[in-house]
Amino acid sequence: MKEDGYSGWWFPPNISANYGQTLDQGTAIITWVTMIGGIVVIGLMLFAVIRYRYRPDRKALYLHGNFKFETTMLVLVTVFTLGGEFFVLGEISEGVWDKIKYQAPEDAMEIEVLAEQFAWNIRYPGDDGQFGETDNELVDEENPFGIDEDDSAAEDDVVTRGLIHVPVNVPVKVKLRSKDVIHSFFIPVLRIKQDALPGETIDVWFQAKETGEYHLVCAELCGLGHTTMKAGFVVEPLEEFQSWLEEKSEE
Amino acid sequence: METNLKLLTVAALVYFSFASITSAATIKGKVLFEGTAPKAKIIQMDQDKACLEFYKGQDPPRFKSLVVNENSTLQSVFVYIGKGVKGKFKSKNIVTLDQKGCAYTPRVFGMLAGETLIVNNGDKTKHNFHLLGKNKYNRSANPGKSIKRKIKKAGSLKIKKKKGKLKSKVMSKIKCDVHPWMVAYVGVMKHPFFRVTGGDGAFEIDDLPEGKYTLVAWHEKLGTQTQEFTVGKSDVKTVDFTYSK
């Protein structure tokens, strides 16, 4: 276990600056609990299999049930399981859920991500910070968002396909949409996974704390080309990000 | 007697082939473009390294949906006879569509219903050949592999787009779902009187029997235009189309 998080060597790198570590912590807790439980149960089973194995002089016994013992065990197990679950859900998970879903910083950089069979389309609002109007009738292979170029806010919009660049240490809010079927926006290094539903705009936010080149993949089987539906995810210093965006807007 | 028959046959063949050449009319012309075409956008192929690699050291690839030639004519316009052709035409030709550099070549092409289409994959990545319209078909091919498919039905479901501006009765769209920027159009025809304009923006349809016809020009972005014309025996007629933006 690392000091700054709970990622073990078996995890992909975790570059999340906010809730990613907590999610890994959750995974670690579940792993340890189920591992200990598994060892106890399988251990007892192995012990019973070996200790009470067949012997010519050994006879099987038939025992009547012990009502008192069984009832006590049933109640205890129920209380422990349910209690544990409510504790985990209420005390630990809810806070994390709240952070992921509802605590996107106000000053987060906004981008739009549109999933389609089988590609990721990304739109940056440009200098004015506003997304231009879109019209479904304008959608084609050259204009995946259907941006209305007559709209003044659309002029500086930057659209990329299969490539996301984000600045390091800056919160980013994604407006996630889907064009056709259910896709899932999954950036493993950020521990983000959010389904994209057709007809809905879903907010996702994240903050990366380490630069590097990673991947965005689709985590929901969406058809024939599902496995090829990926995009580059590049985290870079703010200046480099800005010059990249400028370069893209000139294209 | 036998030699006479042979001679007669040869003579008849010569006569009929000659007659068919001389009695056929030709319709030719140019597809002109007025105005300035917007600069084509760069195709962003970042999602597939094999596509990126193909263009390494070259200029980045651009969309070819609106290509204006140096002599102000339009490329990839499908020109065909819409109405007036009589008779049935059959062919066993093979039409080839190449996938190279994560793009289709040719982008616009025509074929006769009943002909076989071979789709080659010359890229180092998987493509899927997705034909829309009446001859709906979808299949993927690994690098170096080809797809062979007989295209049976002429015509198309209507391609309708941009507030009814773009309609076609013959064009079907071909796309690759793995690489959404890849698009081609095929006109599946009942007769062989069609051409696609190339680098000179010109077309020439010959072997046309005399009659009254409708000539249709179709461009994927600029829509359809029609003109009517009548040709007599061995006429050569010029019809130009003009698109503007």
Image: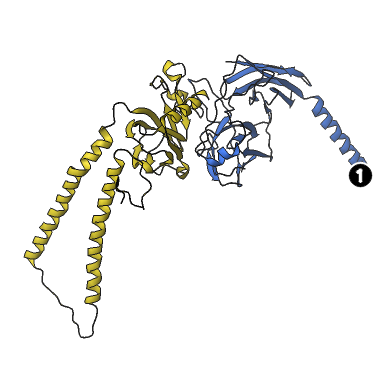
Chain colours: A yellow, B blue
Name the foreground residue: A92 vs A64.
Answer: A92
Q: Quadrant of residue B223?
A: top right
Horizontal placement of A120 versus B3: left or right? Answer: left
Which residue lies most toward the bottom here? A57
Amino acid, disc 1: Glu
Residue A200 in view of the camera: no
Q: From the viewer's perspective, is residue A8 above or below residue B14? A: below
Is any part of residue A177 visible from this angle? Answer: yes
Who's the residue at 46% across and 35% down the image? A163
Which residue was labeled with disc 1?
A: B2
Figure disc tally = 1
x, y percent for residue A93? 22, 43
* Residue A87: x %, y % from top left: 16, 47
Q: Is residue B51 above or below residue A29?
A: above
Judged from this view, the residue extending furthest toward the left is A68
The quarter of the rendered structure image containing the C terminus of chain B is top right
Describe residue A244's horizontal placement relative to residue A66 as left or right.
Answer: right
| Residue, far top | B35
Q: Is residue B95 left or right of residue A37?
A: right
Q: Quadrant of the N terminus of chain B?
A: top right
Residue at 23% in and 85% down: A56
Q: Nearer the viewer, residue B145 or B52?
A: B52
Q: Position of residue A15 (x, y in %)?
A: 36, 41
**Residue A61 figure quarter:** bottom left
Q: What SS does tag 1 mark?
A: helix
**Of B175 and B2, the residue lying toward us:** B175
Mark 1 crowdedness (10 Å alpha carbons): few <14, some 14-19, many ≥20: few
Q: Residue B25: percent from the left, percent from the top?
A: 76, 22
Q: Tell me the subunit letter for badge 1.
A: B
